[in-house]
Image (tube, coloured by chain):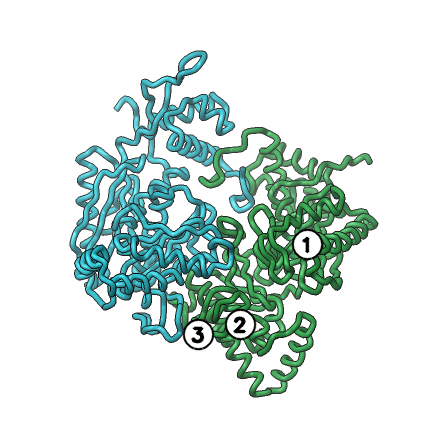
Chain colours: A cyan, B green
Amino acid sequence: MITSTTGPQPADFADVRATNLAVVLRFVREHAPCSRADIAASTGLNKATVSSLVADLIDRRLVRETGLTENRVGRPATMLVLDGSPYAAIGVEINVDHVSAVATGLAGERLLTWRRAFSAGGSAGQDVAAVAAIVRRVVGRMARDERQVLGLAVAVPGLVDVQGVVRLAPNLGWRDADIGGDLAKALRDPGFTVQVDNDANLAALAEQRFGARAGAADLVYLTGEIGVGAGIILDGRLRRGALGYSGEIGHVQLDPDGPACRCGRRGCLEAVAGIGAVLGRDLSPAEIPVEIEDTVRAARAGDAAVLAALDAAGRSLGRGVSVLANLLNPEVVVLGGYYVPLAPWLLPAVREEVSGRAIAPEGGGCEVVASTLGLDAAALGGAARVLDSVDSGRLPGGISRIS
Amino acid sequence: MITSTTGPQPADFADVRATNLAVVLRFVREHAPCSRADIAASTGLNKATVSSLVADLIDRRLVRETGLTENRVGRPATMLVLDGSPYAAIGVEINVDHVSAVATGLAGERLLTWRRAFSAGGSAGQDVAAVAAIVRRVVGRMARDERQVLGLAVAVPGLVDVQGVVRLAPNLGWRDADIGGDLAKALRDPGFTVQVDNDANLAALAEQRFGARAGAADLVYLTGEIGVGAGIILDGRLRRGALGYSGEIGHVQLDPDGPACRCGRRGCLEAVAGIGAVLGRDLSPAEIPVEIEDTVRAARAGDAAVLAALDAAGRSLGRGVSVLANLLNPEVVVLGGYYVPLAPWLLPAVREEVSGRAIAPEGGGCEVVASTLGLDAAALGGAARVLDSVDSGRLPGGISRIS
């Protein structure tokens, strides 16, 4: 159904066709293997239209026929599945000390996961050159595998506006930097789109598409790094706010008398439940994984001081999550980053605080879980964002079946 | 454009026609006076289709022709405007000590604004009977004016789930009450839909349609009563959360060492910036308007103690609004209810806190303003919700032009 926010029907028939191609592609993604008749029955498009759309998607090598036939009365139907073998979606995540890159195929299958050392804090120009070098190698690898890149989305820990300009990324030392434009230039017009988004936003998209709670309509992802950010999905879509700055939960004040925060204020969520606060001291990015391992070991061994510290950190984090539960009533809040290895000890306290602090019965049904996507969730989310573009109708150009 | 959340095109042609009727109706609402050619040019629907749709809308008396013609080259066009003279939308707001009712026409013009004493806290059954009596009188009045009621939406201060069941309305003493169903029964199948929603949600819809910032895509409305609730509009739509319990900002804790809250916790927004806290003491609903008048008089006279108290209350409220600014990055936060008469003294402190506490530059562009809709905003929002239903395709049945 066309809703009031989506407005009147598209004015030209090319748009209608692109929209319908995307409808069929999404149907095959969700229901494969399926027949042309299944598509027609479920979408309300007539059979001739479906046949023509499927032929187009086969031409573009987005869909292919399988030998399978449905086991049913009447003429056996040729079944369709996603193809996408000639395509790749790339996501890149820029951190203070490393860059992660992920490439997936059209169905979301992982083609590549890289992590490369990187030292931010030269000029944004130097940083972009370093990132571009990594992207070029990923693109080269895809080319060797005969895959065309559908697009690139870059995750940045900071304020990214709705145009994709990085307004402020304190840990990278960037301000008002058009990283997407600069990267496209450094890649010398690569022939695919380059998008830039906040890391928590992209990680939330990764959860929506690939996570344990994929498909949840109301989901919030919380990054668990030195900083803490939220990616907010409501009614099935990322909600960026008016300028793109939503999700800055790290600087919601939980306690006016709390410890000093890097932002200059006191008692922000980040200052009481960021990974530095969880581990009990300021750490360099390189020290964190080592310290996490030590903490996990001590917690497993039943070290009372460590267990008490994790419980206290979990309570602070739970107070932050309860703000989300009261304000947004999400179905699920996913803890990411370094919260994941510590989740067995954080989650009980977090859940207790949420159910105790949410005004709705039983926390408004809000579950809190640890991410299952690993530390590169934002990079994976970059690939998810590229696939979202394809699913909403930005299809790669047709490839001749003869060539 | 059909988006991925709205799914495939509707399967049957009646749906397509209803959708297109709604598209044309919305176009006339926003662009009247306009011609059939204008509609065709802007919607992409062909002229014959537009003519047929307009004829249908004229039959239903939702649109009418005017004598006006456009001043242009060629054949003069008959201009169209909203009609709706035979229709009314009704909104009702239930409060502890009164019920407000608003009726509007199709274009949103006020037909009636009533406020009737009401004493909640009998059984929900008795309360429903009292509300039904008021609604019957409103419907009777509309019938005398030869207007058919398009629908009724009822605002309740409390947790209302997505099915419209009131899960908890502490001030009314209601729990798990299907007020909508009970009201429809008490009205003996009135021939229009009865919807129930949270008061802050409906007031936000009123702001979106009728307020000084009408049309803002990212807007939050804050009720300013003994309790404080938020209605959250993001990307043009009310966001209710997974179960309908979003917007419970009143019980977001701003200070763990703050004053006790009615909910049993400490330092909730409501306890530090609800209207009782603003006025400095617990008051019965009947006392509040008197006390507000006294406070306004004292503030105007420059009473230093009152000015300091309002500044302090504004700072607390600003801390709450800054949580919204950081998490949701709204374009505007509208203060409603009893905050409105006090706004000249509250707003400077609120704005200062928001710009000081939001991590995005300049508060992420978040403006804070006082509502211009008066104390019955939620009742008006009920009417807005009924009009939203019409705009999204739930049209009243055709009325023959001959009858």
Q: Where is mark 1, residue-wise?
A: B124
Q: Marks 2 and 3: in contact by CB < 8 Å?
A: no
Residue shown at the point (58%, 52%) measured from the top left: B167
Q: Amino acid at mark 1?
A: Ala
Q: Quadrant of the N terminus of chain A?
A: top right
Q: Amino acid at mark 2?
A: Ala
In the displayed structure, would residue A359 be above or below residue B24? below
Q: Earlier in the sequence, mark 2 or mark 1?
A: 1
Neighbor class of circle 3 (other Cα within 10 Å; few <14, some 14-19, many 20+) is few
Tell which of B223 and B108 is nearer to you. B223
Left or right of A289 in this view: B117: right
* Whole-percent x, y for residue B338 in the image: 62, 70
Tell which of A287 and B55 is nearer to you. A287
Q: Amino acid at mark 3?
A: Asp
Please give the label number shown on residue B333: none
Please give the label number shown on residue B257: 3
Letter of the chain that mark 3 sits on in the rendering: B
Neighbor class of circle 2 (other Cα within 10 Å; few <14, some 14-19, many 20+) is many
Please give the label number shown on residue B273: 2
